[in-house]
Amino acid sequence: MPNGAKEKLMGPAIGLIVTGALNAMVGLLFTISGVIQLGQGPRGMSSDAEEAGWYAGAAAALGCGVLSVLLSPLIIYGASQMLKAKNYGLSKTAAILAIIPCTSICCLAGVPLGIWAVVTLNKPEVKLAFEGAPPSAPNPNANPWTTP
């Protein structure tokens, strides 16, 4: 890779992998607690408006949890492709997904790491590194945690 592009990609890519793993765990907790909460229903609400607000909030939290769990593998896979300087579009998608709070529950880590990844991916020398490697189809036998 030209001009140390691999070194520039390593930090944000590893950060996105960690963020994706945290998103999966926290999203799973949100999903489980949302299902339990919705199953029990509101308690002690004095009006229908309060009850409707409670249901809306619980459903929104559950939806964000499910969305985060579903998109976490995409963030992790995109970040692993970023480590190898393969599949620029997927790498950038993973970085952007980490920035969006509804798709990345762990936004305290996701926002700064996602921005760092987007900024790094937009550097000319990094774009050149990706141009030298065509987007690869997923290989079921490949280990995404190692580089060739």
Image: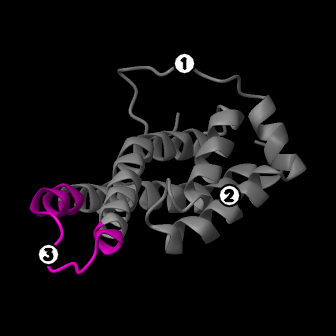
Dot 1 corresponds to which residue? 137
Residue type marked 2: Ala
Q: CA distance from mark 3 to mark 1?
A: 51 Å
Residue 38 among those drawn in magenta: yes
Q: Viewer-proximal residue, 18 or 93?
A: 93
Residue type marked 1: Ala
Please tell me the numbered disc located at residue 117.
Answer: 2
Stretch in magenta: 33-51
- The residue that appears at 30% across and 62% down in the rendered structure is 55
Question: Of the residues under marks 3 and 1, which one precedes in the sequence?
Answer: 3
Please tell me the numbered disc located at residue 43.
Answer: 3
**Residue 11 left/right relative to 43:** right
Q: Viewer-proximal residue, 112 or 29?
A: 29
Q: CA distance from mark 2 to mark 3?
A: 44 Å
Question: Of the residues under marks 2 and 1, which one precedes in the sequence?
Answer: 2
Whole-percent x, y for residue 66 in the image: 34, 48
Question: Of the residues under marks 2 and 3, which one precedes in the sequence?
Answer: 3
Above or below for 134 versus 80: above
Above or below for 145 versus 100: above
- The residue that appears at 71% across and 27% down in the rendered structure is 133
Which scheme is used to colour this image of the protein? one colour
Whole-percent x, y for residue 46 in the image: 23, 81
